[in-house]
Image (cartoon, grey):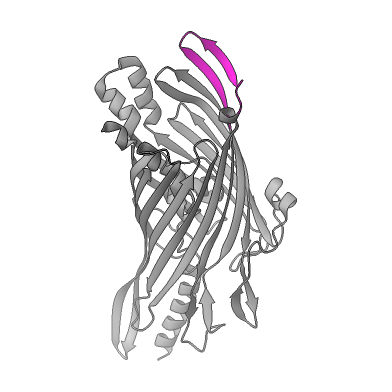
Amino acid sequence: MRKIIFTLFVLTGQFLAQNFELPLFTATSEATSRLAAAIPTNDILMIQENPAYGGIFAKETNFSYIRSYENSSPFYSPLQANFYGLFAGFNFKAISILPLSISFSKMRNYYNYGEITYSSSPGEYITETQYSYADIFSFSVSIGTTIKASAGITKKSFFYNSGVPDRDKEYKGWDYGALFIVPFHQLFKGFNIYAQNNLGINLGITYMLGASIRNSGDKMYINDSRSASSYQVMRKEFNIGHSLTISSILSLPERELKLLSATLGTEAHDVLTKRQNNNPEYVSAPGKFIFFDNFIFGQGSPEISASKGYILSFFETISIMEGSETGGQFENYSSDYWSNGNGFIFESAGIFKVADMLLKNRITETLANHINFIYYYSENNRGELNFRTMNYFQLEVKNITSLF
């Protein structure tokens, strides 16, 4: 009996800890230490950070598929983290004058926590696998051709299998997001650096502003008198961030190639879950967010964590990313919260564009206009027990309507 009680106590503790990692950490977000609300990206998993990305992706991307392979564990417990995502987008500008695009996406995050053995009765032991998964459905709509505004919503369904009968958990959550993109180089003329015959080099300047509310969800009731509270909730969070990207763009009559892009961004994060009478309760956004300190200057505080980071991209082929996060008093964290991240992205877009510039045939033109293969890798260090890596592949199919 003691062994049974101890096993159930451990499982309850594991579930409460695992509850906080169920929303996936994406490679781009990990590398920049949670710059995720408003940065330039093709990563469809970033829809889990801000659902409004979907409408922006749909301006050019009609289909994306993403797949991971046994990433190292988020937090202490999971042994494997695998996931996949499907994205479909359509730009109505292709068939009308409407500057509207919409997107749908479906993703699944799967965590394998390994096997556990528990005593079902004296002298009898059962070995089961602990796992959890999240099914994630998102919809987003974007308007605008030059200045773009996008909004999105995500529905999440979680299931946790503890490996012990009657200890499984199932609950639901919602994400909401908005995103604005202002390309100053398209609004104002005179950003040319060099122009000669049919060749030009232009300066691109783009500002992005985004916000999201993540994990607004159900209460998870715990039928266990030993628990510190009668229920738990997901870690609801308000995120607001902005970034500035400066690019040098090679312009030819039928092709543009970004030679170099540099992005700087800051983001503030406020956990909207507070304890009242020993039970967690949600509070309204934006919480205790301070505009200048947390958002503009990226300074953390005891209540708010803040991220700073950069992305450097070369020839639309290689990108390197780095960032840091400080501040915040999250549950299960120390008051001095910090993280450092770094990573890289490799994509084929620049290679296909250069090949088409040089060879100019039907195959290279099709690849440059419609296909992009991407590999993401990141590392994030939150201390000795919280070092993790992320990696996955993505296939993009773009501008399909121009083929017909």
- Chief SS of the magenta region: strand
Q: Is residue 38 visible?
A: no
How far from the left and from the top, in percent, is residue 271? 61, 64
In the image, 314 versus 164, the foreground residue is 314
In the image, 185 versus 75, the foreground residue is 185
107 sits to left or right of 210? left
Residue found at the far front of this picture: 97
Q: Residue at x 41, y 22 (%)?
A: 255
- Check residue 81 for magenta coloring: no
Q: Residue at x 72, y 52 (%)?
A: 291
Quadrant location of the N terminus? bottom left
The number of numbered discs placed on residues in the rendered structure image is 0
194 sits to left or right of 257? right
Q: Residue at x 61, y 20 (%)?
A: 190
* Quarter holding residue 98: top left
Q: Is residue 310 above or below residue 360?
A: below
How far from the left and from the top, in percent, is residue 313? 50, 31
In the image, 325 versus 364, the foreground residue is 364
How far from the left and from the top, in percent, is residue 102? 41, 49
* Quarter holding residue 192: top right
Q: Is residue 237 visible?
A: yes
Quadrant location of the C terminus? top left
Q: Is residue 239 above or below residue 278?
A: above
In the image, 185 versus 24, the foreground residue is 185
Q: Residue at x 30, y 83 (%)?
A: 125
How far from the left and from the top, in percent, is residue 153? 47, 59
Give the magenta part as a residue range: 188-205
